[in-house]
């Protein structure tokens, strides 16, 4: 996860990601193609190493209109969060470090009619009150298409790492460097000894 949150989340106020409070102060909605140039510019300025351009974002948005959510307040755009909704092949590729997270192969993403096997938080770039929108993002990921998919992320800044800790993500062993994992609360009872998620182990992922 390339995260450039301007205001760091206090580690003293930990919230399970799925239980983040919903604030009415910030609007969260699907990104529009007309906003992609602005969003790409925000990402380039705020997130270390981001090079993706608006046309590339447009390709992913055309494939899945729900992959980018924007934060705004009083019609002012405050940033966005982008996801990779991975199919089972993409899920395995993430664990095994066989996916380009710069420009991921669309064949590894779940189509609108496909099961979402895992959710990768691809990038977060927001400022000011934009961070109040995270509760609505979590609510979006509790809708039927996403509710059973666990979440993954890779922090690129200390602020991003602090946010993952504060929202109960955990760093896990994997072939993918510095991979963090959030297991949905309703999946935890069935995870047993699985290190990655209730349906996959590293041995499973190799086959």
Image (tube, rainbow, N blue to C red):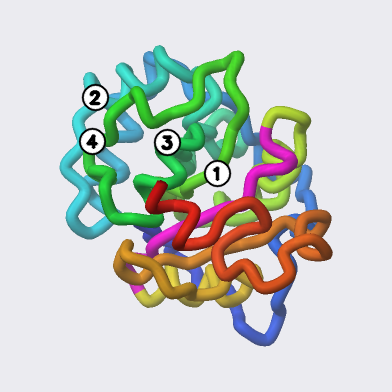
Q: Position of residue 169 (x, y in %)?
A: 59, 69
Task: Measure the alpha-carbon separation of dots 3 and 2.
Answer: 22 Å
Closer mark to the observer between disc 3 and disc 4: 3
Task: Measure the alpha-carbon separation of dots 1 and 4.
Answer: 17 Å
Neighbor class of circle 2 (other Cα within 10 Å; few <14, some 14-19, many 20+) is few
Closer mark to the observer between disc 3 and disc 2: 3
SS class of the residue under badge 2? helix
Residue position marked by numbered label 2 in the rendering: 56
Stretch of the chain drawn in magenta: 146-157
Residue position marked by numbered label 1 in the rendering: 118
Answer yes or no: is residue 125 visible: no
SS class of the residue under badge 1? strand
Of the residues under marks 1 and 3, which one precedes in the sequence? Answer: 3
Q: Which mark is residue 89?
A: 3
Residue position marked by numbered label 4 in the rendering: 103
Q: Which residue is located at x 32 percent, y 65 percent?
A: 175
Neighbor class of circle 3 (other Cα within 10 Å; few <14, some 14-19, many 20+) is some
């Amino acid at each position: 996860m390339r995260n450039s949150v301007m205001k760091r989340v206090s580690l003293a106020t930990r919230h399970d990601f799925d239980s983040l409070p919903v604030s009415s102060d910030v609007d969260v909605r699907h990104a529009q193609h007309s906003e992609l140039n602005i969003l790409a510019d925000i990402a380039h300025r705020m997130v270390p190493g981001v090079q993706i351009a608006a046309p590339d974002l447009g390709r992913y948005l055309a494939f899945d209109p729900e992959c980018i959510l924007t934060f705004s307040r009083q019609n002012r755009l405050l940033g966005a969060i982008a996801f990779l909704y991975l199919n089972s092949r993409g899920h395995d590729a993430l664990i095994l470090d066989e996916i380009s997270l710069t420009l991921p192969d669309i064949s590894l993403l779940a189509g609108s009619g496909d099961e979402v096997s895992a959710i990768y938080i691809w990038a977060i770039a927001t400022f000011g009150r934009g961070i109040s929108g995270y509760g609505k993002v979590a609510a979006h990921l509790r809708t039927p298409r996403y509710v059973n998919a666990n979440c993954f992320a890779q922090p690129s800044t200390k602020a991003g790492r602090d946010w993952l800790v504060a929202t109960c993500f955990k760093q896990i062993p994997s072939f993918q460097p510095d991979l963090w994992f959030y297991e949905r609360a309703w999946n935890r009872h069935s995870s047993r000894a699985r290190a990655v998620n209730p349906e996959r182990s590293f041995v499973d992922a190799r086959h």
